[in-house]
Amino acid sequence: MKPSRLQAGDEIRIIAPSRSLAIVKGEQRRLAEERLTELGFKVSYGKTALFHDDFFSNSIDDRIEDLHDAFSDRNVKGIFTAIGGYNANQLLRYIDYDLIERNPKVLMGYSDITSILLAIHKKTGLTTYTGPHFSTFGMKAGLEYTMEHFKKAVIEHEGFHLAPSETWSDDSWHLEQDDRTFHPNEGYMVIQEGEAAGTIIGGNLCTLNLLQGTEFMPSLENRILFIEDDEESHPFSFDRDLQSLLHQPDAGGIKGIVIGRFQKESGMTDYALQEIISTKQELKDIPVIANANFGHVHPFVTVPNGSKAVLSVKNGKAMIDIQS
């Protein structure tokens, strides 16, 4: 089930199902709203998006109310999360999935929001989007590639090709907008060659692991798996988190894997990642690539959970095509 494409004049609702929007600086919020307005959207906010407690989140009741209000409001066509965090999975048992199935809309976010995106995809069949938070649109420089692929995923009608960005950055841009460092992007790292077609599923790996063994865990059958993690992950934790996922009963249905570029603070190296993948006998016959523009390193693509994808990795080159 695909939501309608976004178009000029649509209302976008900003909600905070993980950390509060209050954590995002006022100038960053202003620029994010300006960017979305320039695309022709009307921006509105959940009633409690700026509320916060001692953990800079909000009560389950308030967060659920804002989520349900956004899906219930007929004027709202897209729902963007404010920012990530640690506790979005608190909401899963309280979400009215029937309400969402009756009112399919673009739902967008990443990182901790992975739990909500995938639970809703599992329960309703709705295509959900691992992509920019509302706060992401408040980035002063280096947003062009992210914006381009956001448009391809939720505004334009054709399928699209995921070509690597020309540069990448691991800066704490939200803390210092005017002192950025961009590195040349050497493209995808090929770990295992092969060809695969399947349905996309993925997001933040350690958050995806939280769904295992629950009613909210999506099927891994016939999937192209997109996984990434942030600076809190390191080679040892990534190794065991991936292994845990591969112990899922239907993990044999994974057809190919796309791994997002790691943040420098994680300590992950190309060699370490290649060695980790080489230990996974479950993956020996499928294509695996890494250093993709996906996740916590900027810029990044918008990945539609539930769309079809083709992954072709041969002769040291990788091609990723997504059916919009």
Image: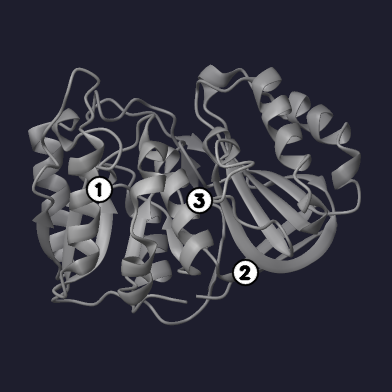
Q: Give the residue type at disc 1.
A: Ile
Q: CA distance from mark 1 to mark 3?
A: 36 Å
Q: Counting residues from the N terminus, which is met first, the one under dot 1 or under dot 3? A: 1
Query: Could you tell whether 170 is left or right of 184 in the image?
Result: left
Q: Label 3: few (<14), some or many (≥20) within 10 Å?
A: some
Name the mark on residue 165: 3
* Residue in the foreground of this view, choosing between 62 and 12: 62
Image-quadrant location for residue 69: bottom left
Query: Could you tell whether 210 is left or right of 59 in the image?
Result: right
Q: Position of residue 202 (x, y in %)?
A: 57, 51
Q: Which residue is mark 1?
A: 64
Q: Which residue is mark 2?
A: 321
Q: CA distance from mark 1 to mark 2?
A: 35 Å
Q: Position of residue 10 (x, y in %)?
A: 17, 73
SS at circle 3: loop
Q: Label 1: few (<14), some or many (≥20) within 10 Å?
A: many
SS at circle 1: helix
Residue 230 seen in the current view:
yes
Query: Could you tell whether 92 is left or right of 304 in the image?
Result: left
Q: Are marks 2 and 3 in contact (CB under 8 Å)?
A: no
Q: Give the residue type at disc 3.
A: Ser
Q: How is the image coloured?
A: one colour
Q: Position of residue 37 (x, y in %)?
A: 12, 62
How many numbered dots are placed on residues in this image?
3
Mark in front: 1 vs 3 = 1
Mark in front: 1 vs 2 = 1
Q: Counting residues from the N terminus, which is met first, the one under dot 2 or under dot 3? A: 3
Residue 190 position (above or below residue 312): above
